[in-house]
Image (tube, rainbow, N blue to C red):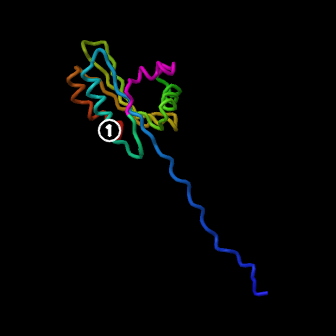
């Protein structure tokens, strides 16, 4: 009767692995400010985002992606649909808009969290010229991705 009913020591369950985070980088597009769009797109492509495991760079702009999924509004629902269509947990993109005043432009860089359905960070600035936007774009990308 030496066989006791001793229970084996409890083993702590292994936590599930952290889900892999996929970032989709979407290039900027602007017919009115093509040099600024190229500069911003290059900066987005080279940006480092903490916590991201893999990244892909879209060959088409945000507007083209939005048209392809038939969702053109700048809303959380549309950005979530874009993320799902690109199999991404995060989106990094920029919008370049004319302010209507003598070649001024507004550059907005957004890091969007598809899983949380909300922008993580957005950086925006109004520039007096395309050259100033090119010079200031790195700071905007850094602010949005820090």
Which class describes the residues within 10 Å of circle 1: few (<14), some (14-19), or many (20+)?
A: some
Rendered image quadrant of residue 53: top left
In reply to whether residue 144 is colored magenta, the answer given is: no
Residue 131 pos. (x, y %): 20, 23
Q: Which residues are magenta?
A: 57-73
* Circle 1 residue: 47
Residue 142 pos. (x, y %): 30, 38
At 24% from the left edge and 22% from the top edge, which residue is drawn? 35
Front-most of residues 134 and 62:
62
**Position of 68 relative to 123 (above/below):** above
Residue 82 pos. (x, y %): 48, 28
Q: Secondary structure at mark 1?
A: loop
**Position of 75 relative to 111 (above/below):** above
Q: In the rendered view of the protein, which quadrant contains the C terminus?
A: top left
Front-most of residues 10 and 107:
10
Residue 107 located left or right of residue 2: left
Residue 6 pos. (x, y %): 71, 78
């Amino acid at each position: 009767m030496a066989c006791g009913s001793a229970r084996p020591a409890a083993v702590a369950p292994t936590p599930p692995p952290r889900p892999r985070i996929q970032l989709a980088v979407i290039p900027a597009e602007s017919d009115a400010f093509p040099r600024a769009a190229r500069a911003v797109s290059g900066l987005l492509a080279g940006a480092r985002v903490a916590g991201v495991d893999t990244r892909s760079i879209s060959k088409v702009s945000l507007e083209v992606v939005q048209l392809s999924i038939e969702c053109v509004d700048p809303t959380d629902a549309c950005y979530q649909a874009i993320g799902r269509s690109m199999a991404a947990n995060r989106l990094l993109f920029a919008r370049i808009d004319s302010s209507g005043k003598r070649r001024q432009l507004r550059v907005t860089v957004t890091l969007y969290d598809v899983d949380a359905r909300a922008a993580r960070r957005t950086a925006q600035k109004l520039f007096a010229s395309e050259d100033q936007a090119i010079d200031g774009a790195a700071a905007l990308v850094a602010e949005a991705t820090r």
